Image (cartoon, helix red, strand yellow):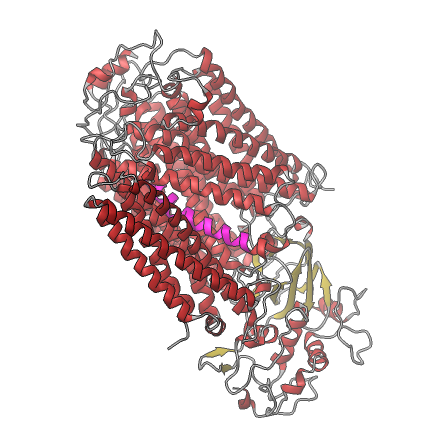
Amino acid sequence: MSLEQTTPYVAHHFDDAEQQHDASSLGMWVFLVTEVMFFGGLFTTYVVYRTAYPEAFHGASHELNVTIGFFNTLVLLTSSLTMALSVHAAQVSKRGMLVVNLFLTMVLGNVFLGVKAYEYWHKWHEHLIPGPHFVYHGADPVHAQLFFSLYFAMTGLHALHMIVGEVLLGILLLRAAQGMFNKYYYTPVEMSGLYWHFVDLVWIFLFPLLYLIGRH
Amino acid sequence: MAAPAIDTTLAPRSEAPVKPRKTYLNADYSVSSWLLTVDHKRIAILYLVSILVFFFLGGLFAAGVRLELLTPKGDLLQADTYNKFFTMHGIIMVFFFLVPSIPATLGNFLVPMMIGARDLAFPRVNLLSWYIFILGGAFTLVAVVGGGVDTGWTFYTPYSTTYSTSNVMPAAIGIFITGFSSILTGLNFIVTIHRMRAPGLTWFRLPLFIWAHYATSLIFVLGTPVIAITIFLVGLERGLHIGIFDPALGGDPVLFQHLFWFYSHPAVYIMILPGMGVVSEIITCFARKPIFGYSFIALSSVAIAVLGFVVWGHHLFTSSQSVYAALIFSVLSYVVAIPSAVKVFNWIATLYRGAISFEAPMLYALGFIGLFTIGGLTGLFVAAVGFDLHVHDTYFVVAHFHYIMVGGAVLAFLGGLHFWWPKMFGRMYPEAWAKVAAIIVFIGFNLTFFPQFILGYLGMPRRYHAYPDEFQVLNVLSTAGASILAVGYLMPFCYLLWSLKYGALAPANPWQASGLEWLTPSPPPTENFAETPIVTEDPYHYGTDDDAEAVHVA
Amino acid sequence: MRAYDFPLFPEQASTMAPQVDYLYFFLIAVSLFFCLIIAGTLIGFSIKFRRTPTNRIGHRIHGSTLLEVAWSIIPFGITMVIFFWGAWLFFAQARPPDNAHEVFVVGKQWMWKLQHMEGRREINELHVPVGQSVRLTMTSEDVIHSFYVPAFRTKFDVLPGRYTTAWFNATKPGEYHLFCAEYCGTQHAGMIGKVVVMEPAAFQNWLSEPPPIVSMVENVAAPSSGGAPLSPVAAGEALFTQKACLTCHQPQGGALGPSLVNVYGSTVKLADGSTVTADDAYIRESILNSASKIVAGFQPVMPTFQGQLTEEQVMQLIQYIKSLKTTPPAGQAQNPPAAADSAS
């Protein structure tokens, strides 16, 4: 979106800063709608197969580590808090607070990705990566493999979105350190914040759907 | 001049482009000024050139298909080659010509101008969308050059994920990438139409072209992500052999069809809605009348966009979805037919008591109404479940959707291109040639595709390179029609190019048309409007004394 | 070569064909009606209201809500007639009659393999009697195909991994095209054949005569039948023994697996408390992927047969299981009545 608009000036084709900000904001929301539809296709696929093969999905879900998943959920929720604090800091022109919170958000995001990588490594070790080398000893391995296909597709796409978010945060951090954001111009921080919250929200759906099914 | 009252200093009527004036075309001649432009008008031209390249490439494949079908035996093309030809024809025409055709060219050029804006809301995103389009196109061309794809443009699983040995991956990646150019274009249009309208330009004063593009953009942003994720899953299954859709791996191939058509049926409306917008502009201008039933046409566009999302299952009547699902999709398909019918009736009513002239754009618009009517009526045939069991996957369906996509979308594209050509390039096209070409296209089109209805009811399945002898006569007719159609396509290509250098200089408003875009000089300056216009009246301000004067002068 | 003999209308050779054609004629009439109205007014207005020196400006007419309502409601009413007509036809085509002659169809790249209930096999040809309903149970070994006989106006997709059905009742002896309508790869256009409609007596003769060649048949150990083709039930029975299914699925129950007597069509209670109707799809899934639905009271110990049975063999097993009734049909010598309840 308008992330590259580093100057507080109004671009030539806008009438004023308010119109520019409104346009960026609406643009970001429309973009998030497309993201909802993008993940929506995956969620639909998941729901269809889970309804068809509930036993296999329950069994396969038990192969996931709930503790690790829960820890990652906490990490991500905390990062949403620091992101919200970043936006607030930009709005009240507190450069130090902005830099610190952006940095914390980045760190938490990296912790999440690191834990995710560990989980993937673990699954690889247990031969739970779908494909020719898939080994599964529970009931209905064919459809358990389907569960793992969806697990990797969904968490993988989510992780990809996290990585994009990390890059955005990195750019923001550099520019924030240079003092580019203040109460007159904070649109990029706000828009990146919307994106980050959306990515968190996707995880809030993924966690129970993948980790918690069949557990009471 | 029949335009909303504005500050007239910005476009003096007497202006004739005698001496070089700064326009968006001559602002800078360097290559980088084109490749790095953020001017929506230049990006429209970049898109125009790109999609025309794809159109002629897709046309070449169509020519191969039609030539093979001259004889019942598979003699000109081997089975494998033929399958690749119709697949490449479909992929290129759908994803790289029809979907971007009007929105990315005429839409990019005109949406800001029609609403009195200096550019789209996100000019750099607009340029990015073109580069994404080119990148996706490059992948698809790699698939073509590397030996082609043979899955059909529909990529049905498990054939596409497990059995096909052709270049499915590059083609799928190309379509995946290109989807994002559609998404960005749609996003840009939505934000622009919401936030950048000139003062006084309320929603119900918007030209119908804008309403049509708004509805189209809704489909772009809601539908395209779904085809993206679907193609992504196909790529996963094919590339990594993990089970998603292949029943041998526990998947469900029909789920793919549901996801695919959730986008690909609304995609038909992506192709036709902008064309409907073009036709509304042209008919009012050449009938010198306000549009009949403005709000009904405007809202029917939105209704089509919304309802279009709930009819995808009518592509699966024979695919073993439940009987009741089939019936629901059937009845919804009839519901979505009504807003389209309403548009046709309103266009006809607009002609009533008009003062109609028949320049080339008007011929295309009238041809559009006729062909779209036939396409729509045959849609009623295939939406009847019990009937569709017979004609599904036959040439009946092929004829039906070509009447919509070619008879509708392509004729509207050509009509719009002629109508706004003077505005885009500052030159008039040769009228006599254009009229002849329009008539040739109309005749050639009908001769090509009408016999296919009969072939389909006779039972000739689609995607057959060899067929029983009794189908030959109709196939020969169809191929003969296709060669006439090809002449009709090549003629505008030649005379429009010719007109860029030799055409008469175009005045600001050659058609005495209403609409903000005609208030600027032809071609417009980079900033479109020196001063933001202020709109005080409804669109299509035809039929007044002022209008009479304008026509008299013309 | 009959290059100059070109029909404009397909042959009617089934009870369904005239029904579909009536709807076709109605649809053509509706289309002609609207085309005449639209083309007529379009051309009429174009001539009457063309621009002339005296007619230079259009009248400022903005619309009429009455007209808008009229031309929304009336076409909608007409489309609803079409909808109900089409739905009625669809119901008729979706429900095969009970006493139909059964044929099993397996599609594969790029041929049709068919077997009659009585045992006779065919490839790319289907012989059927005139005047009797024929029910097709279809599946695919690889990609999606579609079984299409234009003269019968019938078509249904043939999918891998599941069963679909179609039926027709031929009304005219003769030979008709059989096409694959769903694109299935390189030789899609070669996946064609013919349906031969015969007089009932001739058909019965044909059915009992030995086939010219036995090919493409994954023949199981053929007991005693001296070359005559096995019926699907008999072939399934042989398979049932050969694959040692009988070890666990004993008729009287009490073994590792449930008894299969009377199981077909019954409601089966599963380990997770849900129930399922034992139809073709359920039995197929239980054979190929036994762990996906475990019958209540049993352990998931059955090996999967995915990849070890052809689609035809699975169909034969299903037909055999279907034949296991407490009153055994003629030809089923063994299988004394057993407590069917032990399965559920």
Q: Nearer the viewer, residue A211 or C47?
A: A211
The image shows a total of numbered marks equal to 0
Quadrant location of the C terminus of chain A? bottom left
Residue C221 occupies which quadrant of the picture? bottom right
Magenta range: B213-236
Q: Nearer the viewer, residue B413 or C123?
A: B413
- Residue at horizontal 50 percent and vertical 37 percent from the top: B135
Q: Nearer the viewer, residue C333 or B208?
A: B208
- Residue C116 in view: yes
Q: Position of residue B536 (x, y in %)?
A: 17, 27
Q: Position of residue B499 (x, y in %)?
A: 46, 15
In this picture, residue C98 sits left or right of residue B195: right
**A57 w.r.t. B361: above or below:** below
**B227 w.r.t. A153: above or below:** above
Any magenta on residue B215?
A: yes
In this picture, residue B510 sits left or right of residue B45: left
The dominant secondary structure in magenta is helix
- Residue B321 in view: no
Residue, far top:
B19
Quadrant location of the N terminus of chain A? top left
Q: Position of residue B455 (x, y in %)?
A: 58, 43
**B161 w.r.t. B44: above or below:** below
Q: Position of residue B172 (x, y in %)?
A: 54, 46
**B376 w.r.t. A207: above or below:** above
Any magenta on residue B175?
A: no
Residue C37 occupies which quadrant of the picture? top left
